[in-house]
Image (cartoon, helix red, strand yellow):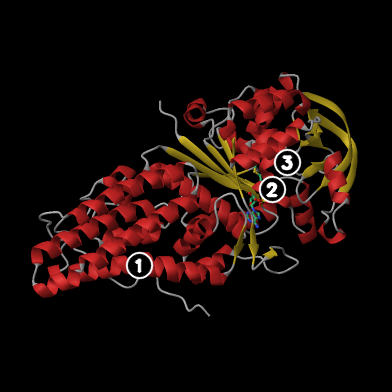
Amino acid sequence: MSKSFYVTTPIYYVNDVPHIGHAYTTIATDVIARFNRLKGNKVFFLTGTDEHGQKIERTAEANGEKPIELANRVVKRFQDLSGALNITNDDFIRTTEERHRISVEEIFKRVEAAGDIYLSEYEGWYDVREEAFITETQLEEIQNMPEDKRPVIEKVKEESYFFRLSKYQEPLLEHYEKHPEFVQPSYRLNEVARFVEGGLRDLSISRTTFSWGIPVPGNPKHVIYVWFDALTNYITGVGFPSDEKMFEENWPADVHLVGKDILRFHAVYWPAFLMSAGLPLPKTVFAHGWWTVEGEKMSKSLGNVVDPYQVVDEFGADVFRYFLLREIPFGQDGDFSKSAIVARVNGELANGLGNLVSRTLGMIEKYFDAKVPEPTAFSADDEAIREKAFSAVSTFEKEMDEIAFHKALVSLWHYIAEVNKYVDESVPWTLAKEGNTERLATVLWTIAQAIGAVTILIYPFMPISAEKMWSRLGSTDSLDSKHLIHAKEWGVVQSGQTVVKGDSLFPRFDDK
Ligand code: MSP
C-alpha cells in the first residue's frame, strides 16, 4: 500500500465569514495538492472548520443564536469557497461532527493512559480571540504594548486538566535538531526552538466556565481545550481511530500549512500531543506570512476586510490565485491592493503569457488553416528553446517541492519571456511572406510545444486558464491525465490538432 501525499489547511473559526487571509491559506494548499497530483502522487487534501470554544459560544450568544446555529450558517460560506476558488479538497471536516468527537476522546484517553494528564487548577490570563492561555513572558509583552494594540485578555481561575508539556521540552528540541525540515521556512524553526528552549510549562487542556466543546471523557463538567480539539482534526480527517487502513495510507501528514500566528500550536503543542499518544509526527509544518490591505492591518474595526468572493467576481479565480502566490515570497508578509493585482495581470498575464498564446494560435489559424503543422528540420534555435523547456520544468519542480511558489512562477515567466523572444527572432510573419512554409511549420510547431509545456506547469496555479489553453491547443484529452513528465515531452501538442485562437485569455484592466 503506497502512502498518499497528505496536505492540510488550518480549520477556520466560524465566528466570522471568510476573508482573503483564509482564501490565501486554502489556495496555497490547493496548489500544493494539485502540484503533487501532477507529479503522479496520490493526494489527500483536507480542510474544514473549527467550531467549538469560548469565542464561538460568545459570538453566538451576542447574535442570539445557539453555537451550532451560528456554525451551520457560517460553515456554508467556507464550504462554498471551494467552488468559487476551484479548490480540490478531498474532504471538509467540521469539529462538531460525531467522527471528530470520537477521535478527540480517543487521543485524550491515550494521552491520559501515558500518564500525561492530571487535574489541578489554572489561574492566569486567557486571550479569547486567540483561544490561548497567556504565559508570564507573553503577559509582560502585552503589558509593554501600546494600549490600542493590546489584545483583550481575561483573568481565569478554574479547575482544569493539565497536559505535561514540560516533559516534552527535550524530545521536541531533539526532533527539531534531527528533522530541520519539520518547521519551514527555516527561520521559523529557530523561533520555535528558542521558544521551547525558554522552558515549557504544563498546558491547561480543559475549561469549566463554559460548555461549548467536547466533554472530557469521564468528567463532563470539563470541556476539552479548543486547540486540543482542533488540532486533532488532522487525524480525524484520515480515519482515526476506526479506519486503520485509511489512517495508514495517509498519516503522517506531509505538510500542515498554517499562518505564522498559529505556528506555535502546530510546531510545539501538536507534536507533543502526538508523541504522548504514540502517534507519528507530521513531516512539515510550513508557516506563511500575513497580508495587510493597502498598507493597513486587515480588521473589522477599520472596515477594510477583503471578501474573497468579491475579488473573484471582479478578477476571476485564476487571477486571484496567481496574484496571491506570485506577489510575495511564500513565508513573508505582503500587501494586498487592486492596483497591485492589475499590474500583475497587465504585465505578466496579458502581456507575457496571453500575448504568446494568442499570437501563436492566431498564426496557426491564419497560415495552416488552424491545424498544428508538421515540423521538418530543427535549427539550433529550435533545439535551444527545447533545452530551455527541460530545464524550466526541472527548476519549477525543485522550487515547488520547496514550497517556493513565487520562485517557481518567476522561473516559469522567465521561460515564457524566452519563448516570446524565440518568436520574435524566428520572424514567422516574414517566413509566411517569403513563402518559406517548411521553416514556418517548424517554428510554429516548436512554439506550440513550448505553450503545451507551460500549460501543464501553470495548471496547479490557474486551472481554468490552463484548461482553456489546453483545449484551444486542440487537445481532446483531459489536462488531468497529464503529468509533469509530459511537460518535457516535446510533442505533447500533436500535429494535425485544430487550434482556436478565441478571445483574450487575460483581458487587461484599466490601471486607473
Ligand atoms: N481555528 C484556528 C486554526 C486551527 S488549526 C488546527 C484559526 N482559525 S482562523 O480562522 O483564525 O485562521 C485561519 C488561518 O487564516 C490562519 O492560518 C491564519 O494565519 C490565516 N489568516 C488570518 N488572517 C490572515 C491575514 N491577514 N493574512 C494571511 N493569513 C491570515 O486560527
Quadrant of the image for the N terminus?
Answer: top left
Type of residue at label 2? Asp
Q: Is mark 2 within 8 Å of ligand 1?
A: yes
Label of residue 261 in the image? 2
Depth check, mark 2 against mark 3: the one in front is 2
Q: Earlier in the sequence, mark 2 or mark 3?
A: 3
In this view, 24 is above or below 267: below
Residue 357 x/y as whole percent: 30, 65
> Residue 226 has which mark?
3
Q: Earlier in the sequence, mark 1 or mark 2?
A: 2
Q: How far, Cα to Cα, is label 1 from label 2?
A: 37 Å
Mark 3 vs ligand 1: CB below 8 Å: yes
State the residue at coordinates (18%, 67%). Answer: 364
Residue 375 figure quarter: bottom left
**Image coords of residue 115 (percent x, y):** 75, 19
Specify the label residue 354 is tagged with: 1
User: What amino acid type should be assigned to the residue bearing mark 1?
Assistant: Gly
Who is closer to the viewer here, 285 or 435?
Answer: 435
Q: Is residue 445 left or right of residue 411?
A: left
Q: Which quadrant holds residue 125?
A: top right
- Against 479, is 365 above or below? below
Question: Hey, what amino acid is under mark 3?
Answer: Val
Direction from residue 476 to residue 6 in the image, left or right: right
User: Residue 291: percent from the left, percent from the top?
Assistant: 63, 59
Q: Nearer the viewer, residue 26 or 360?
A: 360
Q: Say if mark 2 contacts mark 3, CB within 8 Å.
A: no
On whether ligand 1 comes within 8 Å of the CB at mark 1, the answer is: no
Q: Tell me the SS state at disc 3.
A: helix
Q: Residue at x 26, y 54 (%)?
A: 385
